[in-house]
Image (cartoon, helix red, strand yellow):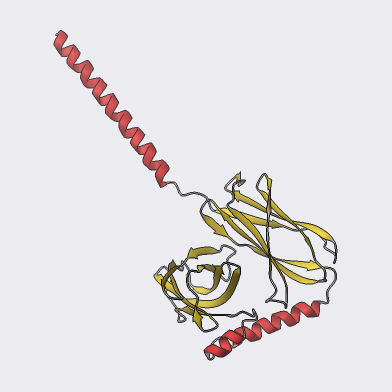
Amino acid sequence: MKKLILFISLLSLMILAACGSTNNNENTNGNKDEVPSMVEVEIKLPEAVEPNQEVKIEALVTQGEENVDDASEVKFEVWKQGQEADHEMVVASNDGSGIYSIMKTFEEEGFYYVVAHTTARDMHVMPRVELTVGNPEPSEKEEEHEEEGHSHDHETHEETDHNEHHGHESSLNMTLNPTDAVKANQEITLSTEIKEEDVALTDATVRFEIWHEDSEKHEFVDAKEVSDGVYEAKATMKESGLHYVQIHVEKDELHEHQQEELEVE
């Protein structure tokens, strides 16, 4: 009888130990399967900006409900509308509580673009906002949009015309494939060939920024150099409609980008 009781007790302990081990494994696997929240960046601008007035431009970096204080890099890219070849890149200071900032003086009134290039927790985010300095004529902005529309109307012509109409003066020549319509939810290979003054640009950092025309969410995909000047990456468009693909190229002091369109069926 005593032996039977002892046997039952040992058996019960073994079952409890096995259950505990199973629960621990499930918890561990559950943690591994968790997908981290996306890093988000909100650019904060002053309500009014006047020429020759120093102002503070901020980026609030968050992940879920958490302020991100350990971003690897935050840089602000600033340029005036109509002066696409003259971009200024300024490294932001970490003010704490997820805030990164720069001080900036705009010498001329007009319409400006501000991009917060943010790398944090193995993610890259690049939101862009418009900023009005002073009281520029509205016609200036309308003319710029007309020029951009005229440019896009010619993007299906010969490659030389295609490059001339991008509005961003650059020594780089970039082409994107595929150019034909692709299928939604079907993995494709995005490929770009990059040349600088007809010479293949090698060892550059290249990424594709992809977004649907009706979405504020941008996806960033790092490309790999597969041959001299040719960079590729896998991507999947999850819905049909017009998508924009912006090619970002960085090498040493060089920082260029070019936007293309891709129709998804």
Image quarter in which the C terminus is found: bottom left
Q: Is residue 14 above or below residue 175?
A: above
**Residue at 52%, 63% in the rendered image:** 219
Q: Is residue 90 above or below residue 169?
A: above
Left or right, 228 with respect to 142, comes to left
Left or right, 108 with respect to 169, comes to right
Q: Tell me the quarter of the picture where residue 21 sits.
A: top left
Residue 19: percent from left, percent from top: 30, 29
Image quarter in which the N terminus is found: top left
**Residue at 21%, 21% in the rendered image:** 11
Near-viewer residue (149 or 189) = 189
Residue 28: percent from left, percent from top: 38, 38
Left or right, 120 with respect to 13, comes to right
Q: How many labels, in total?
A: 0
Residue 15: percent from left, percent from top: 25, 25
Near-viewer residue (82 or 194) = 194
Left or right, 37 with respect to 91, comes to left
Residue 100: percent from left, percent from top: 68, 52
Q: Tell me the quarter of the picture where residue 145 sits.
A: bottom right
**Residue at 16%, 8% in the rendered image:** 2
